[in-house]
Image (tube, coloured by chain):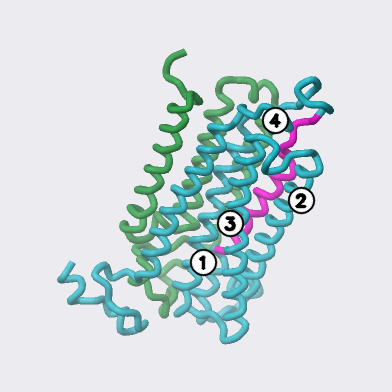
Chain colours: A cyan, B green
Amino acid sequence: MAHAAAAPSSHDTTHGHPPTSTGLDNKKIAIWAFIGSECMLFASLISTYLIYKGRSVVGPYPHEACLPPICSTPLKAILNIPVTSASTFVLLMSSLAMVLALAAVETKDQPKHTTGERILGNSKLWLWMTALLGITFLGFQAFEFTSFIHEGLTIRTNLFGSSFFTLTGFHGAHVTAGVLWLLTLLAIDYRRGLGPKDALNVDLAALYWHFVDVVWIAIFTLVYLIK
Amino acid sequence: MSHDSSHDPHHANVDHAAMGIEKEHPTWSTYWKVAVILTLITVVEVWIYYVPAIRDSRAFVPMLLIMSAVKFVTVVMFYMHLRYDHKLFRVLFTGPLIIAMTTIIGLMFLFGKLTLLK
């Protein structure tokens, strides 16, 4: 370790970050450590949901209709798979847009000869696309939450409502934070332009965004598809 | 457009060492292919949900879990570049992930949601 610290890579002087014993930027190590801790946060929320699954005394229920006398009025199964499938697709595509945004920033100073290259190399386009897809996902979630409330499911209705709104609400809050981060990057891009030297900062946002996507991959299967 | 370093100065100003990039990141075409694969798996997941014969079979849950795991690993390996970046990042991610998954499975056993005995 001491040897590595004594002999920092040539990139250190080029890009001005202080030498570290690993040779890696501390911000990138920190974001991976943060993502690791987030895995455990979401594991606790997912296990809570799974433990409480099927233990609600009153409806509405996620996959089954609730009929009298258990429910005073007939309630249909509440999860809307087509809508959630669409929002899942939107979030997956936002991950694609994000990785293209990072690639565009990394290759900013390379000459672009064709229209396709100019489109692929346009970081603003892909950052906007990612942010808009993230906002669309949040729109789907707002639609889902309001329709659930209209159908009689709130965070206080039953165990399903409590664990469902907590889990998906936490995920939605993470998506919101990601959208704000993307908008900040966009503001910087418009102000002075993002270039290869900013690749690390865009990479940090990208890692966070992809993590939010992989959490949703797990939630979609465990909460929505498995009965 | 390619990220292939053989004919491209690949991000001459990108700090590969600080970012922990050990192998060249994939090309744009790879990213698109990954997106198509992720979409197809999602379509299959939703499709089998609507096929009663599959949904009511014992294979339904394992199939969904496998497809979900494949999507998860694909995003982490290709979009988060864990396949291409420094080993330390793999340790920082997989360590807590193993703890997280063990916690979920342990709690499921503890609360009787999973059992080895019928």
| Residue drawn at x 62%, y 59% as measured from the top left | A94
Q: Is residue A101 magenta?
A: no
Q: Residues within 10 Å of mark 4 (few under 14, many from 20)?
A: some
Q: CA distance from mark 1 to mark 3?
A: 20 Å
The local secondary structure at tag 3 comes to helix
Which one is closest to the eye, mark 1 or mark 2? 2
Q: Is disc 3 on the same chain as disc 2?
A: no
Q: CA distance from mark 1 to mark 2?
A: 26 Å
Q: Is disc 4 on the same chain as disc 1?
A: yes
Image quarter of residue A190: bottom right
Image quarter of residue A58: top right
Q: CA distance from mark 4 to mark 3?
A: 34 Å
Residue topped by disc 2: A143
Q: Is residue A84 magenta?
A: yes
- Count up the numbered dots: 4
| Residue interval drawn in magenta | A75-98
The chain containing the residue under callout 2 comes to A
- State if disc 3 and disc 4 touch (CB < 8 Å): no
Q: CA distance from mark 1 to mark 4?
A: 35 Å
Q: Earlier in the sequence, mark 1 or mark 2?
A: 2
Residue topped by disc 4: A63
Residue topped by disc 1: A205
Q: Residue furthest top?
A: B118
Q: Nearer the viewer, residue A37 or A135?
A: A37
Vertical relation: A200 (above or below) B22? below
Q: CA distance from mark 2 to mark 3?
A: 29 Å
The local secondary structure at tag 1 comes to helix
Q: Earlier in the sequence, mark 1 or mark 4?
A: 4
Tell me the amino acid under the disc marked 2: Phe
Tell me the amino acid under the disc marked 4: His
Q: Residues within 10 Å of mark 2 (few under 14, many from 20)?
A: few
Residue topped by disc 3: B32
